[in-house]
Image (cartoon, rainbow, N blue to C red):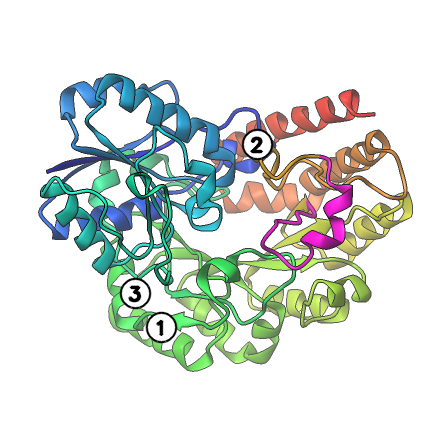
Amino acid sequence: MRILLVRPWINKHITTVKNYLFGEPLGLECFATLLKELSVEVLLVDFMVETSGQIEPYLASFKPDAVGITSQCTDVENVKHIAETVKRVRPETAVIVGGVQASLYPDAFFVPCIDYVFKSTTRANVRAFIHMLQNGQKGHRIDGIYDQSLNFINTGEFCFNEYVVPDRSSTARYRSEYKYVGFQPCAIVQTAYGCRNRCHFCLRWKIEGAEVREVAVEEIVKQIGDLDEPYYLICDNDFLINKSRLEAFCHHMEVQNIRKQFVCYGSVNSILEKPEVLSRLRKNGLVAVILGYESFDDQQLSDYNKASTIDDNERATQLLKSKDIACWGSFIVHPDWEKRDFKRLIQYIKRLKPELTTFSPLVPHPLTSIYETYRSRLLYEVTDYDKWNFGDVLIRPSKMSLKAYYFQVLKLALMVNFNAHSVKYTLKAFPLRNTLKMLTGFNVLFSVYIKNFLTRR
């Protein structure tokens, strides 16, 4: 049996850094592992790298029995386009859709050109699914999978995705292109699922669960040692959460003498709880921590269900700096801000001095607890998938016109990307060619903000 796995092209109509900074398709690589365990022949095509590539030649040469397509929210239309092409060229080929969007909003893919939608992926349901396909069967209800022949109805209990070691050989021809900010080539490693923080705006703990499920450190360090890339991103919600696990991680890295640089996500409280571990992590390659500051205002932090304060943010930042670990901070731009609030945010950023700063407008996804609060003020429908991209403003501002609000966003973008502290850090931390790529990407993003400013009323 042959299965073609596909990551769709970049959606050129959206406002997001994904248009110029993207990593390996971890979900597809994990699915490839499960398929190969069942002796399925797999070919993975990444159209985020092959930006001008087409699927028809792969259908003709590989002749797949099924095509599996991964998805994020902004990929919906491209996924449907690929599915329609498959059915036009090879009507007998089954079309499967998985990924984040399929997990959260599977009904986005309940259309005639798509045969199966995976809400969750485990060894058990993949094994049952492949057995069904190989035997030419239909209509067998499998937990975690919506089947068109069953009218996409499935009352089975859905579980969380099972941990699988990704098959990185499936993306071997693309790996030099995968990057994270200025690090290239850069791999992605996941060491745990779930999040204890349960922020009201966050979808990730909804996807992975509110309890942390950790993978054995020995297995993770083996993966890291096997990487060809000199850089990697640990994409856990909060890698710094468990002190004893971090110490074990450092121990195994030291025993195996692994010398690679890495970036991780961390929470303010996790940093403040275990300052003594940071020095050892730095010696084992930790060069930057991605911190969700979210706001300059304690009341807003409380509203977001953040367990930290603005003073905690500052203490955590200074602690990282004292250990020679860069801080990459992120903020949420609130729809109820006035001009003075944007100024307060800029002053707060200047006080914190993170090495890199990003921001996004508040996104009230329908599965989050803040959705109903802002539902009446949404500028777009939930089915306007292109707009739910962490770049466009989704909620009508309450204190200024949308045009004026976008103007403040424009000024903020200029400040966070061209302040002297960040420019100096970027030139020092990354190769010049990567810095230039980042600058080019920001210009694309900035041009979209300008367009929004000029066209919004």
10 Å crowding of disc 2: few (<14), some (14-19), many (20+): some
| Quadrant location, the C terminus | top right
CA gap between label 1 and label 3 equals: 8 Å
Q: Which residue is located at x 62 percent, y 34 percent?
A: 387
Query: Residue at label 3?
Result: 220
Task: State how many labels appear.
Answer: 3
**Camera-side mark, 2 or 1:** 2
CA gap between label 3 and label 2 equals: 35 Å
Q: Which residue is located at x 31 percent, y 69 percent?
A: 253
Q: Counting residues from the N terminus, which is met first, the one under dot 3 or under dot 2?
A: 3
**Residue type beneath disc 2:** Asp
Query: Residue at label 2?
Result: 386
10 Å crowding of disc 3: few (<14), some (14-19), many (20+): some
133 lies left or right of 317: left
Query: Is 309 in the magenta?
Result: no
Please provide the residue range marked out in magenta: 361-379
Circle 1/circle 3 CB separation < 8 Å: yes
**Residue type beneath disc 3:** Ile
**Relative to 438, is 376 above or below?**
below
Residue 267 screen position, x and y as percent? 58, 67
Q: Counting residues from the N terminus, which is met first, the one under dot 2 or under dot 1?
A: 1
In what element is the residue under mark 1?
helix
